[in-house]
Amino acid sequence: MSITKEFDTIAAISTPLGEGAIGIVRLSGSEAITLANQIFKGKDLDNVPSHTIHYGHIMDKGQVVDEVMVTVMKEPKTFTREHIVEINTHGGLAVTNEILQLVLKTGARLAEPGEFTKRAFLNGRIDLTQAEAVMDLIRAKTDKAMANAIGQLEGSLSQLINSIRDEILATLAQVEVNIDYPEYDDVEEMTTALLREKTESFEQLLRQLLKTAKQGKILREGLATAIIGRPNVGKSSLLNNLLQEDKAIVTDIAGTTRDVIEEYVNINGLPLKLIDTAGIRETDDIVEQIGVERSKKALEEADLVLLVLNSSETLTEQDRRLLDLSKDTPRLVLLNKTDLPQRIETDQIPQDAIPISALTNQNMDQLEVRINQLFFEQAQQLEQDATYLSNARHISLIEQALESLQAVNDGLALGMPVDLLQIDLTRTWEILGEITGDAAPDELITQLFSQFCLGK
């Protein structure tokens, strides 16, 4: 077990600022209980059992600041492995800030963004992948994204990476023994065969993990889905239907949407980042021109395109141009306004186009089914507890580790000495250590935790 490091006591508001039922001011450090006790009127917090909550009042110069419940958790069985105190106050900007200022006056220091989680990492409570999973859990938009973050927080990715690192270390040790204590004439051949077998095994494991990156990225960041079409075909109505909220402006005036609007929607537990774009057409309006250019950029960067056509009108030249522009991107063609008389030429559009009415909700369930089939059918066949590689940093490091393994294989093919090949295999071990934080530089750790919210 790691020995807890000695840090000063930090404090921060751990709930969103603003009106709410409860606001929490959190302290962590060796003096957390003593400092909180100085402003708390109720039980003596220095003498209460760990993991208990106590009613009382926060006092300032004899005046009651607020009626509170104070939770006391003593080291080492806490998130940071330090004493932690959480002051549960009435939610409100003024009262939580005043209590925080009182805590700081007693001797605590204002925590930096992510410093509570950083202390959990530095004190050996969690590793770097678990720390990053904390932020993924906070940002999770669907149940599947949440489940993936919880799995990583519980160490699913860490265990897999550490298992591979242990195997690499054992292989390096065996190679070293064979080199230092050669008892047979064919030791070089035996060592080469061992390296080839092991590197192929490691490569297979890492490539299998890398295959989950696309699904993991979608779970973490959402599927970038651009809704495109010429003006007034019902793009904003489609967005509102999917969101079940009137978040986009819907009118009968062509060119109403002049910017890119982004919203998230949950499709069977998977997040879609919907991008409602300005209608793509030729226009002399400078502001609308900017929106059209942004729409074209969104089309280029989208993971999925929902091309909306007006089924109550014949195809226009703009429709045909959009069909051509989007043909190389995964797309679904939607024939909107089926509640009106149909005039579109069905023989000139893809056979798998989906007739819908965003206004009357006709066939909207089929749209969700098709999206699921297009991207997630294979993912659903994976084990429920599968580990998804969703973090861009992790993906990059896995790719670097595979490059190092390839260097070992290339060296084996060229007949290079085994002691030289050890260098690349050792480098693979070190790169994988950066994922869990065992070999991560201090600058990286500081940069990662700076992205956390204050109070976490």
Image (spheres, rainbow, N blue to C red):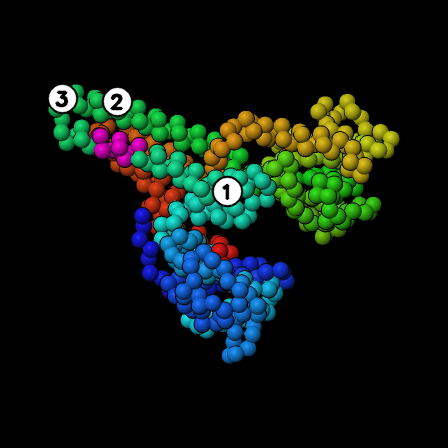
User: Does 403 sit above or below residue 69?
Assistant: above
Q: Nearer the viewer, mark 2 or mark 1?
A: 1
Three-letter amino acid code of the residue under disc 2: Ala
Q: Which residue is mark 2?
A: 193
* Quadrant in the picture for residue 446: bottom left
- The residues colored magenta run 167-175
Front residue of 413 and 188: 188
For image coordinates 63% across by 62% down, the residue present is 19
Q: From this viewpoint, is residue 282 visible?
A: no
Q: Which residue is mark 1?
A: 149
For image coordinates 31% across by 53% down, the residue present is 3
* Quadrant in the picture for residue 424: top left
Three-letter amino acid code of the residue under disc 1: Ala
**Which secondary structure, mark 2?**
helix
Q: Mark 1 or mark 2, which is nearer the start of the sequence?
A: 1
Count of numbered tags: 3
User: Does 332 sit above or below residue 294?
Assistant: above
Front residue of 114 and 322: 114
Disc on res. 184: 3
State if disc 1 and disc 3 touch (CB < 8 Å).
no
Residue 343 screen position, x and y as percent: 84, 29
Front residue of 409 and 97: 97
